[in-house]
Amino acid sequence: MQIQSRFCSHRLAALLISLTFWSGLPGPVHAQEELRIATSYKLMTLDPHYANLNENTSLLSHIYERLVYQDDRLDLQPGLAVSWRAVSDRQWQFKLRENVRFHDGSPLTADDVVYTIERIRDFLKSPSGGFRSYVTGIESVSAPDPLTVVIDTNGNIPNLPLSFSSIFVMNRPAQGFQTTEELNAGRAGHPPVGTGPYTFESWSSGEVLKLARNDDYWGGRPGWPQVTFRVIESPAARVAALSTGEVDLADAIPARDVASLKQRGARIASVGAARINFLQFDVERDRLPGVTDKSGEPIANPFKDALVRRALAMATDRGILVDKILSGYGTAAAQVFPVGLPGTSETLQPEAPKYDEAKALLAKAGFPDGFNLLLAGPAGRYPGDGESLQAIAQSWARIGVKVQPAAAPFSVFNTKRAAGDYAVWYGGASGEAVDIILHALLASPDPESGNGALNFGHYRNQAFDAMLARAESIQEGPERNRALAEATEFVMADQPIIPLYHFHHIVGYGPRVASYAMHPRGWTTAMQTLAATE
Amino acid sequence: MKAQIVSALKRRRHGPVLTASKLLLASYILVAIAAPLIAPQNPYDPLQIYGWEASSPPGTRGSGGYLYLLGTDGLGRDIVSTILYGLRISLVVSIVSSALAALIGLTAGVSAAYFGKWVDIAIMRLVDLQLSLPTILIALIAIVTLGPGIDRIILALIIAQWATYARIARGVALSEANKPYMDAARLMRLPTSRIIFRHLLPNSIAPAVTLIPIEVGHAVALEATLSFLGLGVPIDKPSLGSAVANGFQYLLTGQYWISLFPGLALFGLIASINLVGEDVRRSLDPRNHSL
């Protein structure tokens, strides 16, 4: 059976909207004090510890803050903590910022950090993608004085501060723990209270989040008295909202719309995303669904052979993906992060397709005539996903591998992949740092330690595991980054995945925004804007 | 029956629009049949597609040595070839599904009339239920349940369309069932299947058959809608509907040709089928000619 295609109920609606309201910039000018943002991130909860998804963290970072901030080079900068240091192999100390107040007026103390960790570790039972993995290594946490947090770990965790660049700090209530339901009830329950530059006003799930300026913010007076996020999932509708001036800023702009938006006076900012889209093979099972020889007879799993994986990688034309499908708003990939970010390798460069060599490799592996396979992937989840499947089918046909592309809505795709219905598929991964992605994507899967959480193909390479573990035991710094780059070079020679591209985050903004600072993590926040002055 | 249709066709006066529609429809069918011979590219064969020539405007010369007369889509498929091959899918799907839906609907309607009682109630309540829901909704539910694929699309269209035929056939069969020749057939103790298929069905068929040409037009539109929504044909084998959908995202980017030309082809196809179909229907309608 073939799974395919994009069910886009919003297409018609989006078409109508775009045709009706397409009138060019600037549109109706609203009250000068409000920043209106159209976002693709569908905020589903006000609980900052519920699910570790950009959908939640991007918007909630206006209200809550982290101890450590990751800058646009992914380096760590002081957030609510002004400094941190490893006291010993198993102990870390964080010094908190003075004179920080929560929105309810209470001061930020070390006990609030203790509460935050306890809430994640002991109280919440969040779904997958939760924050618990950040605190599993924490043995105990204490607050010797109001501005000092001491954390004992049950092993050497050199990148512990990185975990705290993801964890939002909440304040300890009078008693017990705040539940997710109480937070989600908004004003009717316990509205979210943080230390961030904006305070919570109102929220309707999956639609609108309204924020107001926090005049007492420790980092100075925020730029906008009011910020309204509107969740608009359809890209065409987001583009339309921006071009009519209905919103001041829209994120996740499709690359193909950039030219016409510019023509209409919108400005565009973009950055290579700290993430990777790739093809992943099932290298464990002996037989795979959809993999047959040219006469349609099932064959033994060809992807166990590194030569086959290598041949397919050599026959992949990333140029078409990046230049044609992503209209140039993407970077061809040869590793997990764009070259230049910490932990990446300078020597791993994306290669141009070499069909003849690839065909020779395939013949050497015992497939002179190629074989048939079904290439699965989500449609509409990542920029260029569905089209990539077809472009790869074109490339691989040149070495005799006949591809049946099968795109399905992400939820369907995900369920089927988990059920083992696919042999090779298109995937995406993002994370705070190179080692986190390497860990999730390529380390030998082990449910207990949480290694290989995204290694759905069950690739196992003990030598690589050892190299990664060694790199991860090194303190943050050039030496650690070099070790990570070497581990990446080592594992990529075995081609467990085929890195395709790092797509670019694209944001468009109107005349009321003077500039927008992109972040490779793909966050969309009011803090990244600079208001235009009269 | 055949003679009836032929004479009906001859009796009709041919307006210029009708003549044009007939010519158009005939050429659609011809080029659909001849697509593999006349299309410059086989858009279903990845080896013939040049990804680097994606989104070329109309009139570009491609690496294959031929002109992209109407440009290429976002993956480098020649639009002319996509239309020709898509036309095949659209026509096959709609004609096969309409024919089968008519067959099933007629049998169900005539059976309901012949057996009466609970058979009648069961079949006709199902028909009522279906006719109370929009056709597109039925087709959507069917295709989501059945899964994608060309065979599934045909099945979904049959499910969406049989009820109309059933209702009309039942009405006619009810009045036929009381005629003397039916009494005679029953008295001769002919097998039930023989009575239904040899006597009742052929005599109830005319009014329902007049529906077929119109329903083929509906089926084309329905298939295009499902494919546009991404629920129809496989992504690497575009029909007219999915060819329009492929270009939809480029509509506001200036690359109008990806959607526009398949859309025009679809428009012409549905319009010509409807005009010709309406004409055939009128000619076949017993009320339209004196005995």
Image (cartoon, coloured by chain):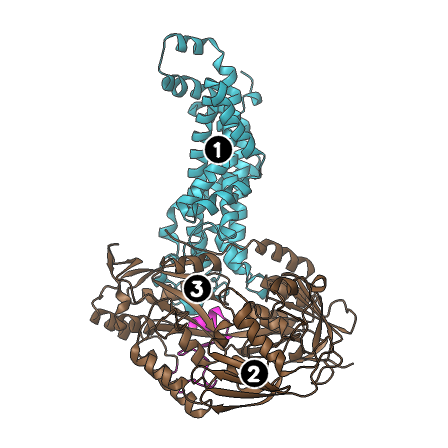
Among the chains, which one is brown? A
Above or below, B12 relative to A92: above
Residue type for callout 2: Ser
Which residue appears at 75% of the width and 81% of the height? Answer: A216
Residue type for callout 1: Trp
Label 1 environment density (alpha carbons within 10 Å; few <14, some 14–19, many ≥20)? many
The colour of chain B is cyan
Residue that carries the numbered disc 1 in the rendered image: B162
Tags 3 and 2 touching, CB below 8 Å: no
Magenta stretch encompasses residue A413: no
Q: Earlier in the sequence, mark 1 or mark 3?
A: 3
Q: Nearer the viewer, residue A400 or B40?
A: A400
Which span is picked out in magenta?
A: A320-349
**Numbered disc in front, either 1 or 2:** 2
Residue B9 showing in the rendered view:
no
Picture quadrant where residue A530 is located = bottom right
Direction from residue A353 to residue A367 in the image, left or right: left
Label 3 environment density (alpha carbons within 10 Å; few <14, some 14–19, many ≥20)? many
Q: Are marks 1 and 2 on the same chain?
A: no
Residue A262's x, y, as percent? 63, 73
**Of helix, strand and loop, which one carries label 1?**
helix
**Of helix, strand and loop, which one carries label 2?**
strand
Q: CA distance from mark 1 to mark 3?
A: 39 Å
Q: Nearer the viewer, residue A216 or B183?
A: A216
Residue that carries the numbered disc 3 in the rendered image: B76
Q: Chain of mark 2?
A: A
Picture quadrant where residue A168 is located = bottom right
